[in-house]
Amino acid sequence: MSAPAGSTGRDRRRRATSRGPARAGVAAAVVICLAIVAWLLHSGTLHGSHGAHRSAKAPGGGLSPPAGYKLVWADDFNGLRGSRPDPAKWRFETGGNGWGNNELQYYTTTPSNASLDGAGHLAITARRQVYTGSDGVTRDYTSALIETSGLFKTTYGWIQARIKLPAGAGLWPAFWAIGSDFDQVGWPASGEIDLMENIGSDPFKVYGVLHGPAPGKPNGYNLVAATRSATSLAAGFHVFGIDWSPGKIVFTLDGAPYATRTPASLPSGGKWVFDKPFYFILNLAVGGNFPGPPDATTEFPATMLVDWVRVYSH
């Protein structure tokens, strides 16, 4: 499954140009992949892996890290209502170029699209509003994308985020990561780890995906895993993450592993590019070729509420 497309670093214009066409191709392939995954989950064929550490619940809605891990980076989004996320930890990406997927939102830096709620949360909010950016592009929706590029990157760790997702057709919330060498090697050679993606029309299902290079495939491979929650991911907070070690990534939901990926999991010729630094991204996309447009039942404003993001390392 492809993460929200588009520019994700210092040179926004170059990234939007170089990454967008590749992501558009991926979006079409994703629809087929997700249909297969949905059938496998429904039939009981796909169960995921359960060999990783299952974390115990900790006070305050958190999770206890595996033994031997220490906290190396975190944001609890404490601050005054309406203030921006910490600029020492997050930077904004802006634009409404469709992000390679004909998406409908314009990403802004305005507090109405991304700000602290004063109760210890970050609210990333998609709104139905006509907006024209400084580039002259006009969109009918606004939202926000923030990232740690140039501010924080990490290799390996127990990485978790506690998030309450929005529900509704055409909504695409995500917590994901891109290899920090993107400027040098491009995508998909940079690699991409989608720690959490959800399609708002099905608020019970979460996807964890790896993207990387493969010979003869300009869009590389997309290795999709998924699981279903017993309760709606939009009804309350859930913890999404990975347990990442050399040659191994375990996707987790509320501390329970649901899929394990290693180099042996890759399709023939696929290259494992996940033993290097990555930076993180939070965003809420609207519409596009995938997941499709909002419909009459989709309620706006729609908010992805982030309680915290935490990175632990050995």
Image (cartoon, rainbow, N blue to C red):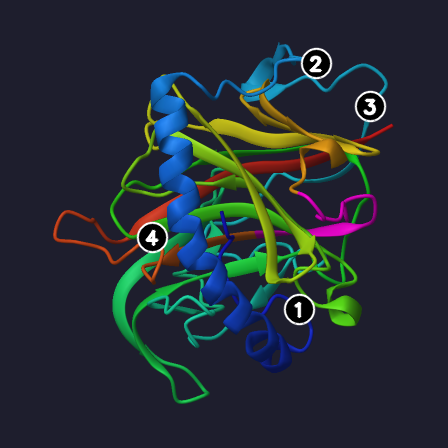
Q: Where is residue 298 in the image (x, y as percent from the top left)?
A: 20, 49
> Dot 1, crowdedness within 10 Å: few (<14), some or many (≥20)?
many
Q: What stretch is highlighted in magenta?
A: 268-281
Mark 1: secondary structure: loop
Q: Residue 9 carries which label?
A: 1
Residue 176, x across and y down, in percent: 59, 47
Choose the circle earlier in sequence order: 4 or 3. 3
Residue carrying label 2: 53
Nearer to us in this view, 276 or 23: 23
Identify which residue is drawn at 77% across, 49% down. Answer: 273
SS category of the residue bearing label 2: loop
In the image, residue 267 sits, relative to residue 183, either above or below, namely above
The three-letter amino acid code for the residue at tag 1 is: Gly
Q: In this view, does 292 lie to the left or right of 97?
A: left
Q: Quadrant of residue 11?
A: bottom right
Nearest the eye: 313 or 33:
33
Q: In this view, does 135 lie to the left or right of 35?
A: right
Residue receiving disc 4: 291
Give the position of the C terminus as an image quadrant. top right
Closer mark to the observer between disc 2 and disc 4: 4
- Tag in front: 1 or 3: 1
